[in-house]
Image: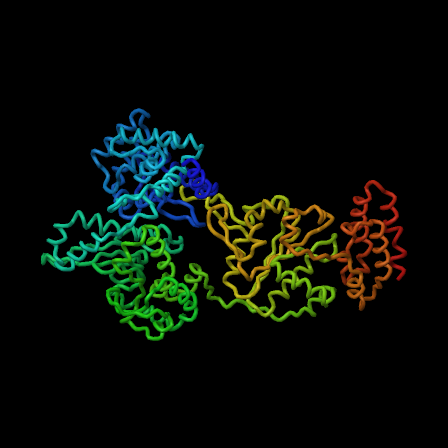
Amino acid sequence: MKEKVLEIIKNHVPEIRMQQRKANEQEARQLIVQNLGGMTASQLATFFEKIDTDYWDGKSKQGRFGITFLGNNRKLICEQVDVANKWIQLLWNAKDDECAFLVDKFMKERPLKGAKYGFPSLILYLRDPNRFNIWLDVMWAGMKVYSGKTYSGDSGTDYEKLNSAINQFRDEFQIAPQSLDIVLTELSKLAPKSSGEKKTVAGQADNDTKLFTTKTFELLKKMHDAPLAATYHSNKEDIKKLVEFPLQTLLLGAVSRLPKEMTDFLETEKKIFARFLKNDYGQGGAWDYYWGALYPKGGKRNSDAQLFAWMNHEVLEFGFYIGDYGDEQKTRFIKNVKLHSEKIVASLSLKSSAENILFGGRNKYQEKGVKDPVEWFQGISTDNIGARVELKAGEVISISKNDLIDRVARVFETLFPLVLMASDDDPISKIASTTDEDDSENIIHPDYTIEECANDCGLEVDVLARWVRAIDRKGQAIIYGPPGTGKTFTAKLLAKHLVRESDGFIDFIQFHPAYAYEDFMQGIRPKPTGTGGLSYPLVPGRFLEFCAEARRRKGICVLILDEINRANLSRVFGELMYLLEYRGDSIPLAAGEKFSIPDNVRIIGTMNTADRSIALVDHALRRRFAFLELHPNYGVLEKYHAENSFAVSGLVAALKDVNRKINDRNYSVGISFFLRNDLESQIEDIWRMEIEPYLEEYFFAQPSNADDLKWDKVRSRILAS
C-alpha cells in the first residue's frame, strides 16, 4: 500500500499544482484576516471561489472539494453572511482545545443552511493546515483503505480522531497538507466493491461510483404514471437523494471542468435547477422530469440559450436548447447560422460525431434529430433549434460518475458556440476565443522560392534544399557557425521560404542565460488582485503560446530560437526534450496537462560557436536537431559589393589571412560585418571598433598576432583594391 501511495503522489501531486493551491489558500486566508467577522456577501463568494479552485489538466477549475462549496450550497451560505461571519470569527479565534467543541456545536445546531462539517473544518484548516484537516467523506474513505480502520461520525470527537489519523499519515509520507485530499481521494478508489448500491457523498470522486441507479428511474416512472404533487411528497426524500442530488452533482461537476471563458459567460449558481412541483395555482400537478441548465448571466432559463441536463423515466439528455419564450434568441440564432455556419461547422462536425450528438427537434423532449450539423443548418427553423446527447436508462446506470461528468463537460464545450450564436449579434470573435477556430482570414504569404532564398542569402540552391529537407525531416534544426556569418539572417530567409503560400507565421525568441522553463513552457506569475493582494496564476510560456496559435493555422509555422546555446537548454526545454525526438506523442507537463507539438511546427535555432563550441552541446540535444554548418562565405561578400564602387578583393584577402591566423573555424571572423552599401566610408571604423577588439580577446596570450592585424597594418592591403 505504501508503494501505491508513493505512486499517487508522483502522478497526481505535481509541484505546480501545490503552488497554485497554496497561493489560492493564502488569498482566502487574507480575506478572513483582513475582514474577520465582517465579510460582505461578495467577499464571501470570492473567498469560496479562491479556496475551491484547483489546477489540473492544465486548467484552473472550481470544485476542489466536490460540490461541498459549489452551486446552491455556496449560494445559501453567502445569503447568510452574518451567520457565516459569526462562525468564522468563533473558529478563527478559538483556542486549540475549544475547536472540537465548536465543530460539535456546529453539527448539532446546523446554524448555516448549505453547510455541513466541511465548513467549520475548512476555516480551521486555513487557520492552521498543519494541525487541522478538511472533513470530507472521501478522506474518511481513503484512510479506511490505507489503515483498514473505519472512520465515521459527525461529532467533534470524531473530527479529532480524523485529524489525528490524517496527520500521522501526512507525517509518514512527508507530504504537504494541500495534497491530502488528492491522495486520500485516489486511495478511496481502491476500496473493494461491495454488493448493492454505493453511497454517493459530497466531495467523492470515485471513478466507479455511479450517479444514477435503477431506483432513480423507478422513482421517475412513478412521477410519470401519477404526475401529482402528492406523488412527489410521498417519495420526496428518495427523489431528493436519488434524482435531484445526482443530477445537480452531474451538472455542477461538469461546470467545474469547463474553461474559464465559459463559466465567466454562463450562470452556474443562481436558479439553474427546476422543480418537480408545477406552479398551477393549487391544482396539485407535478412534472415527470427533472432538469437544470446553464444560461447567460443576467438571463432566464425559460427564454435564453442554454446548456442543459434533463432526465425522465426513460432517458438522460444533455446538450443545447433555447427556452420556449426565446423568440428573439431563436431569430438571432437563425440569422447567425446563415452568416457564419461555414466558420464553425468543420469543428462542430468532427467533435459532434465523436460524442454522438443529435441536432434538431423542436425541443429537448422529442426523439427526432440528425447527426450531421450541415444538414441541420441547411434546414434550420425556429421549430428545430436544439442539440443533445441521449442516453437510455440502462446505459446511464452503467456509466461511472467521473466518466459521465467528463462526457457532459465535453459536450457542453462542443456546443457552447451555439449558445453564443443565439446570444450575440456578432458571435464569431467570442467563438474564436473559446475554440480552436479563428474567424480572421489569416494572411497568406506570397511565394518565395528556394532560388530566391539562395539569391538573397548567397548560398547554393542545393545546400539550401538539403537544409529544408533536414528541417522537414527532423522538425527542428540549428544553424551554427562563428560570429558574423549570417546565421540569423539565413534563418529568417529559410523561415520565409517554409511559410510561403500559406497562412503560417514566423515567431522569434532570443535566448539568454537567465531564460528558463517558466518563460518558454509555463510558469506561475504574480498578478494583483482586487483586494490588494497577489494571485499566482499559471501562465503559458512563449512556446505554448506559439503552438496554440499554430494549431489554428494550416500552414507551416516557424519558431526561430536565436543564440540557442546561451541558455541552459535542458532546463528551458524540460519535457520538450522528449517531444522533439518523438514528434506526434503527447506527455504531461509539470502542471499535469498533456501537451504535444503540432505537426505544422518547425524550429530553427542559431548557435554562435565562438560563444560555446558545438562539441560542448549536450549529446541528447544533438540527436534531436539537424545541424547546419555556416562558415564565412567570401563569395557572398564579393557578390554583395559587385555593383558598388568599393572593390572588396583586398578585404577578402585580409579576412582569409585573419582566419588562417585564428586557425579555428569556430572563431573565424565572418563577413556580415561588411555587408553594407556604405562600406567604403565605414570600413575603418568597423575594423577598429569591431574586428580589433575581437582579435585582441582571442589572441590575449599572443598579443603580437593581434598587433599584426590592426588597421594600420592591413589598411593598405584592404584599400589597395
The one nearer the camera, 265 or 151, is: 151
Pick the residue in front: 144 or 181: 144
Residue at (66% x, 55% y) in the render: 478
Looking at the image, which is closer to me, 695 or 608?
A: 608
The quadrant of the rendering that contains the C terminus is bottom right
Using residue 107 as the reference point, say whether residue 650 is left or right of it: right
Q: Is residue 278 visible?
A: no
The image shows residue 298 at horizontal and vertical percentages of 30, 56
Q: Is residue 501 above or below residue 436?
A: below
Residue 242 position, x and y percent, is 22, 50
653 or 303, nearer to the observer: 653
Q: How is the image coloured?
A: rainbow
86 to 375, vertically: above or below: above
**Residue 407 in sight from this viewpoint:** yes
**Snapshot quadrant of residue 434:** bottom left
The residue sitting at the left extreme is: 283
Looking at the image, is 531 positioned above or below residue 419? above
Name the residue: 12% across, 50% down. Answer: 234
Q: Tag count in the figure? A: 0
Residue at the bottom extreme of this rendering: 379
State the quadrant of the N terminus: top left
Give left or right: position of 557 versus 610.
left
The quarter of the displayed image where residue 323 is located:
bottom left
Instruction: Please provide percent x and percent y for residue 149.
Output: 31, 32
Q: Position of residue 672 (x, y in %)?
A: 75, 57
